[in-house]
Image (tube, coloured by chain):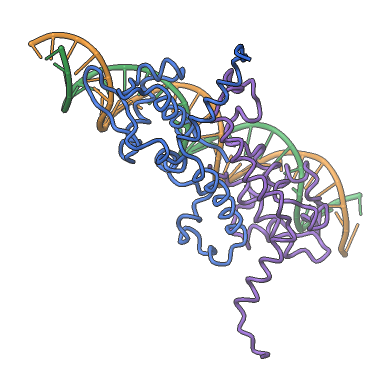
Chain colours: A purple, B blue, C green, D orange
DNA sequence: CTCTTTCTTGACTATTTCGGTCAACTTAGT
DNA sequence: ACTAAGTTGACCGAAATAGTCAAGAAAGAG
């Protein structure tokens, strides 16, 4: 039931862009520094995100990565779909012909239910939710001097 | 979000034992034949299942594998736990010290929710449920001559 | 126009995990 | 004893993963 680093880092990448974009693109170099990720690895995460219409990139000075859609229109499931492919825990879910027992296989049904459970979580959350949760955590850290 | 073949084959192994045990142990060789799995690979699945108290094995003639507990007391989560280890999609869930940002990491919370969602499914199902589902599918296949 | 800055692309590599095989051993029954 | 099981641990090849790098293309600034 493992998530690869693509999905992990990719989500952090997007959240970082969401938090630091002030209208302008966010540079990969800065993301790499803040998130402590290799710049050369991040480059490979951006390509599929562009292909999936999740981010836009601009080259040259003051270039970088920006979100291609409003925060609330970027679902976690979009990100994972783009970076990890399917969320199916096993191949026969996506391709019934993968195994000739698919029709009568009880265990296959279970893996399907598991996929559904994780998809429910991923589809119910958007980047906006992540940003809000992040801000809440930040506020919780600050002592409230103004009271 | 992939399940390895250990969890996949192990679940089928257990279901096969549940379906074919008539008081006596079920032999690995027969399981391998029925499930079309390599005998040598199955051997590696049995060891952790014994360690987890899920099955007992007896050696020698007429030996084999038998369930160590009643069907309804073997949860899917027990099986997966034993064969795959944790269901955490990412290491920092099990070990917060794995990453120094764990406390304030929003994405980590998400992976935790996903784990919880899959655990809910796995803990709600027992081998007995699988057996019953299997029988229902079998019956559905038979045309009902008796009507 | 050219220089710099930034992303783009694809090649490359190291490491790990996975799936699978096998042989030697132990135990239990006949 | 002999035979029929499971037990254990070593081993291997293939594939996936994670990561690095270098050459190039686009966009702006001057």
Horizontal placement of B90 versus B44: left or right?
right
**Residue placed most toward the observer, B8 or C13:** B8
Quadrant of residue B30 within the rendered picture:
top left
Is D30 on the left-hand or right-hand side of A98? right
Number of marks in picture: 0
Q: Which image quadrant is residue B50 in?
A: top left
Q: Nearer the viewer, residue B145 or B92?
A: B145
Q: Quadrant of the N terminus of chain B?
A: top right
Identified at 46% across, 43% down, the residue is B77
Depth check: A58 or B62 in front? Answer: B62
Q: Quadrant of residue B34?
A: top left
Left or right side of B22 for B99? right
Q: Residue at x 73, y 59 (%)?
A: A17
Q: Residue furthest front?
A: B147
Camera-side residue: A123 or A38? A123
Q: Where residue C2 appears, x then y in whole percent?
A: 85, 51
Q: Is residue B130 above or below residue B37?
A: below
Across and down, in percent, residue B8 comes to 49, 31
Q: Position of residue D10 (x, y in %)?
A: 28, 29
Q: Quadrant of the C terminus of chain B?
A: top right
Q: Residue at x 35, y 17 (%)?
A: B29
Tell me: residue B80, above or below residue A72. Answer: above
Residue B49 image point, x, y percent: 35, 36
């Amino acid at each position: 039931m493992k998530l690869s680093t693509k999905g992990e880092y990719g989500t952090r990448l997007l959240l970082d862009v969401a938090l630091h974009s002030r209208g302008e693109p966010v540079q990969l170099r800065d993301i790499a520094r803040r998130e402590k990720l290799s710049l050369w690895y991040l480059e490979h995460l951006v390509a599929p995100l562009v292909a999936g219409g999740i981010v836009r990139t601009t080259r040259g000075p003051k270039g970088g990565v920006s979100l291609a859609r409003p925060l609330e229109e970027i679902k976690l499931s979009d990100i994972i779909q783009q970076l990890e492919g399917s969320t199916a825990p096993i191949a026969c879910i996506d391709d019934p012909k993968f195994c000739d027992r698919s029709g009568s296989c009880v265990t296959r049904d279970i893996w399907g239910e598991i996929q559904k459970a994780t998809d429910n979580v991923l589809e119910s959350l958007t980047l906006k939710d992540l940003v809000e949760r992040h801000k809440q955590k930040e506020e919780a850290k600050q002592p409230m001097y103004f009271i």
